[in-house]
């Protein structure tokens, strides 16, 4: 591993030289035409190959409805021109909310989700032209051990994890969610998916990343019963849920999964890790799962890794400045980027007919498009997604497609402040580029802590 260093590249050549010096498999191209490819997913044709990742704003209403700040965010995302809008984590049960303002879709508020979606589509058409219709996916979630529906930890665990329990407020005598409760929870995913379909979404994502409940189940080696132990049991909940949602929503409704392919977490509590060295990925089980997901009708997978709440948040989000309480990593951020690219590439190459969204691009700032186009051109991903970059620069896709470049004065600077606001319990967005809204929130939370 190379020493940690902040972003300091003034041009593409300097970045290429550093990549070569570190001997990393990161390709960059000046031909950005692959970004304009009309990707195909589940019988739908997207206007381009750029995506907005599900970026949670923690700004919903008490009843789980999107607020005006939520509407503002998705108006900005939609006007930005991405071909895929992946709407943020939305709880399927109130007790599974990660914070009191997390979105929660239910019968009483489905009309507000419909209004949010219609607003986004209208803004997209007004900005990009009447023929521009982004694919819209709603992410469904249960926050598991990170549930805080009323602002204080109320963790729901699949099993005890000595590396995470204390951090999440899990007591030594807490009982794990039962098999019967998990089976009932599957029905809640079905109900939420039907509501999303009623609201007009093109599909739903059964979220399985970042050590929330479904992600934790994938690594349930130490759990007894139908949902723990061997591979078949550990993947059972996700696969059964997919089957039940598909049976009720029909074949035209897109099923997606945002999947942790590598937890970077000690075995036997980690998924996609080498049992002898958890700092190394072992993608044999994740690839096996992806193939089963495709067989069950999943046509879209977004690849992520790591746990932003653990001691190595750089695995998920390479940064220049860490969140409070996290130290500087023992690797260069380009190594973190390369790992995410490699994991995504191996998944995509294993299933070339599946639409795979890649992550890890935001740290590259104005050179996002050069890496994204190279990965799409080489078959290392179907689409390239932006998370923190979309917070900072919602017009990133439009600028790449129309101007052929990003404005370096508008890109994400990987300062972790958007992450810090979320951890401190506030509404989140880009403190630097959208300071009119979020700088005040950040300062208030910082002074309170």
Image (cartoon, rainbow, N blue to C red):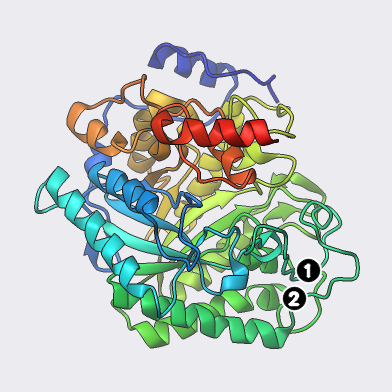
Location of residue 375 in the rendering, given as x and y in whole percent from the top left corner: 40, 39
Residue 227 showing in the rendered view: yes
* Disc number placed over residue 4 in the picture, else none: none
Q: Quadrant of residue 279?
A: top right
Location of residue 74 in the rendering, given as x and y in whole percent from the top left corner: 32, 50
**Is 297 or 25 nearer to us in this picture?**
297
Location of residue 324 in the rendering, given as x and y in whole percent from the top left corner: 70, 33
Q: Residue at x 74, y 77 (%)?
A: 177
Residue 202 showing in the rendered view: no
Residue 230 sits above or below residue 34 on the image: below
Q: Which residue is mark 2?
A: 228
**Is 61 or 218 nearer to us in this picture?**
61
User: Of label 2 and label 1, which has the lower sequence position?
Assistant: 1
Please identify the quadrant where the N terminus is shown. Answer: top right
Residue 273 sits above or below residue 159 on the image: above
Location of residue 406 in the rendering, given as x and y in whole percent from the top left corner: 31, 25
**Label 2 residue SS:** loop
| Left or right position of 367 against 150 | left
**Label 1 residue SS:** loop
Q: Which residue is mark 1?
A: 221
Residue 186 sits above or below residue 367 on the image: below
| Left or right position of 99 against 228 | left
Please identify the quadrant where the C terminus is shown. Answer: top right
């Amino acid at each position: 591993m190379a020493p940690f260093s902040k972003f300091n590249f003034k041009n593409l050549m300097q970045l290429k030289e550093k990549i070569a010096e570190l001997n990393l498999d990161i390709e960059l191209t000046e031909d950005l035409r692959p970004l304009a490819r009309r990707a195909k997913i589940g019988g739908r044709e997207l206007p381009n190959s750029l995506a907005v990742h599900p970026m949670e704003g923690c700004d919903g209403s008490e009843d789980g409805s999107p607020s005006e700040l939520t509407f503002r965010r998705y108006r900005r995302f939609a006007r930005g021109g991405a071909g895929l809008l992946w709407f943020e984590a939305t709880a399927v049960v109130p007790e599974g909310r990660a914070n009191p303002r997390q979105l929660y879709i239910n019968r009483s508020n489905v009309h507000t989700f419909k209004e949010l979606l219609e607003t986004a589509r209208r803004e997209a058409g007004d900005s990009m032209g009447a023929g521009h219709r982004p694919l819209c996916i709603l992410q469904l979630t249960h926050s598991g051990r990170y549930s805080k529906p009323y602002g204080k930890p109320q963790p729901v665990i699949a099993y005890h994890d000595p590396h995470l329990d204390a951090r999440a407020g899990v007591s030594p005598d807490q009982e794990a969610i039962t098999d019967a409760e998990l089976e009932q929870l599957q029905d809640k995913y079905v109900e939420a998916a039907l509501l999303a379909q009623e609201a007009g979404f093109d599909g739903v994502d059964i979220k399985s990343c970042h050590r929330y409940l479904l992600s934790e189940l994938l690594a349930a080696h130490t759990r007894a019963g139908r949902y723990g132990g061997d591979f078949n049991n550990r993947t059972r909940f996700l696969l059964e849920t997919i089957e039940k949602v598909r049976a009720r929503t029909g074949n035209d409704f897109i099923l997606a999964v945002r999947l942790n392919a590598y937890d970077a977490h000690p075995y036997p509590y980690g998924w996609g890790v080498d049992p002898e060295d958890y700092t190394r990925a072992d993608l044999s089980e994740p690839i096996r799962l992806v193939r089963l997901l495709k067989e069950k009708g999943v046509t879209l997978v977004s690849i992520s890794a790591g746990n932003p709440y653990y001691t190595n948040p750089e695995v998920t989000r390479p940064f220049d400045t860490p969140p409070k309480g996290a130290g500087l990593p023992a690797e260069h951020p380009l190594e973190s980027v390369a790992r995410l690219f490699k994991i995504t590439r191996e998944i995509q190459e294993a299933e070339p007919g599946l639409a795979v969204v890649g992550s890890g691009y935001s740290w590259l700032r104005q050179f996002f498009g050069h890496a994204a186009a190279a990965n799409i051109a080489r078959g290392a991903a179907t689409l390239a997604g932006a998370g923190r970059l979309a917070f900072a620069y919602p017009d990133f896709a439009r600028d790449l497609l129309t101007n052929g470049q990003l404005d370096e004065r508008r890109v994400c600077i990987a300062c972790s402040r958007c992450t810090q606001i979320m951890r401190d319990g506030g509404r989140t967005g880009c403190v630097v580029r959208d300071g009119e809204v979020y700088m005040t929130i950040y300062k208030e939370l910082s002074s309170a802590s």
